[in-house]
Amino acid sequence: MSVKLIKAKNDLELAKYNLILSIKGKKRYNHLFSSLIIQSINGFHIKSIPEKEEDMHEILKTLRIEYEALSLNLIWNDLPTVKKKYKKDALDRIYLVSLSTILKSGTQSIGWFSLDSLKEAKSKNILTIGLSNSLLHIIDL
């Protein structure tokens, strides 16, 4: 599969375009879920995105609109629900937002998710969109 980085620091339209392409290219299964998880750069869960992260707010607005238009299932930053769906093998994609914030403590956002090897990581499709102060990782499971 592939790992791809899109540098869209000063080009919000490029970021939106690539996000929409990834959503429309996604296989659609009504019983599967995608999830959005927001975390600090050191992996602690964050409940919401600060207002100063305007470009990420725009990207997530696009994400929500596209999922609603296609009637796809999206879990919005709810870690307990995401963990349950993952354990039931009902999760097919993670949208992982990493903000340039460092927290001293909290709940690890994806400590329940791991890959057994680098070889397994290479078998995943991962798209990372770099914005001004944050990253959006799109991980197909």
Image: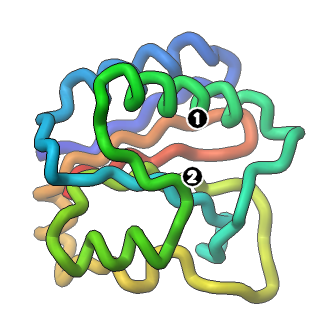
Which is more toward the observer, 14 or 67?
Answer: 67
Q: Amino acid at mark 1?
A: Leu
Asked if the residues shown at circle 1 and circle 2 are in contact, with their CB atoms under 8 angstroms apart, the answer is yes
Residue sitting at the far right: 52
Q: Is residue 42 left or right of residue 7?
A: right
Label 2: few (<14), some (14–19) or many (≥20) C-alpha neighbours in 10 Å: many
Residue marked by disc 1: 60
Residue drawn at x 66%, y 26% is: 58
Instruction: Provide the secondary structure element on which disc 1 rests.
Output: helix
Q: Amino acid at mark 2?
A: Val
Query: Which type of secondary structure does the marked residue at label 2 adopt?
Result: strand
User: Which of labels 1 and 2 is toward the front?
Assistant: 1
Q: Residue at x 18, y 76 (%)?
A: 88
Q: Nearer the viewer, residue 70 or 103?
A: 70
Mark sitting earlier along the chain (1/2): 1
Quadrant for the C terminus, please. Answer: bottom left
Residue 97 is labelled as: 2
Q: How many marks?
A: 2
Q: Residue at x 12, y 69 (%)?
A: 119
Residue 131 in picture, x, y percent from top left: 64, 34
Tell me the crowding category of disc 1: few under 14, some 14 to 19, or many 20 or more residues within 10 angstroms, Cα based. some
The residue located at (12%, 35%) in the rendering is 27
Query: Within the image, what quadrant is residue 20 found in?
Result: top left
> Eyeballing the image, is 11 above or below 46?
above
The location of residue 65, given as percent across then percent down, is 49, 24
Q: Position of residue 138 (x, y in %)?
A: 37, 45
